[in-house]
Amino acid sequence: MTDDDTDDAEAVERPADDETGTGRGAPSRIGRVLLGVGLAAQASEDFRDMDDTIEYAESAGVPMPDVAAPFASGMMVVAGLGIALWRLPRIATGAAVGFLTVVTATMHDFWNADEDDKGGERLAFFGNLAMLGGALVFLREAYKN
């Protein structure tokens, strides 16, 4: 058996790409789980004190904050779990990208924040920017399958 024969045998045994995340071409399982669980956990924190979340959304000029804040938080919990489990990955990653794009630029606009709030908003902005980068990578992967 030559090295070529070994490569061919391994290629046959490898699972095909699929949306379940078990195929060889599926995005990094560890990366997906970390990003997905992180997004879901962060969004679930909003539910611990929804009154503050609604008040924060209202202060940023979000229309209908009493509806928008719980909806957005719930959407991110579901999107995060979808990314972590790689279920409906196009929808899950698309929802995360859409949410993070809007929220990062509008809710965490540190350049407009009061001096007392500027540091916290800057930290939230760049944290969201990093999560957006990860979500964009997985969105691309979702559309490869």
Image: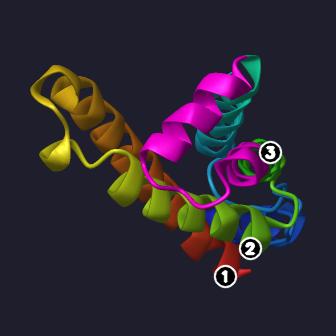
Residue span colored magenta: 49-73
Residue 138 relative to residue 88: left or right: left
Q: Is residue 60 above or below residue 34?
A: below
Image location of residue 124, percent across then percent down: 35, 34
Q: Tell me the chief SS of the magenta region.
A: helix
Image location of residue 20, percent across then percent down: 89, 60
Residue annotated with mark 3:
74
Instruction: Measure how far apart labels 1 and 3 are at the Cα level.
Output: 24 Å
Q: Secondary structure at mark 1?
A: helix
Do the CB atoms of the residues marked 2 and 1 lie less than 8 Å apart? yes
Instruction: Decide if residue 2 is in sight here.
Output: no
Residue annotated with mark 1:
143
Q: Residues within 10 Å of mark 1 (few under 14, many from 20)?
A: few
Q: Earlier in the sequence, mark 2 or mark 1?
A: 2
Q: Earlier in the sequence, mark 2 or mark 3?
A: 3
- Which quadrant does the N terminus fall into? bottom right
Residue type at tag 3: Gly
Q: Viewer-proximal residue, 139 or 47?
A: 47
Residue type at tag 2: Arg
Q: Is residue 84 above or below residue 87?
A: above
Residue annotated with mark 2:
90
Residue 76 relative to residue 56: left or right: right
- Which quadrant does the C terminus fall into? bottom right
Place residue 9 in its image quadrant.
Answer: bottom right
Q: Viewer-proximal residue, 69 or 94?
A: 69
Give the number of the mark in front: 2 or 1.
2
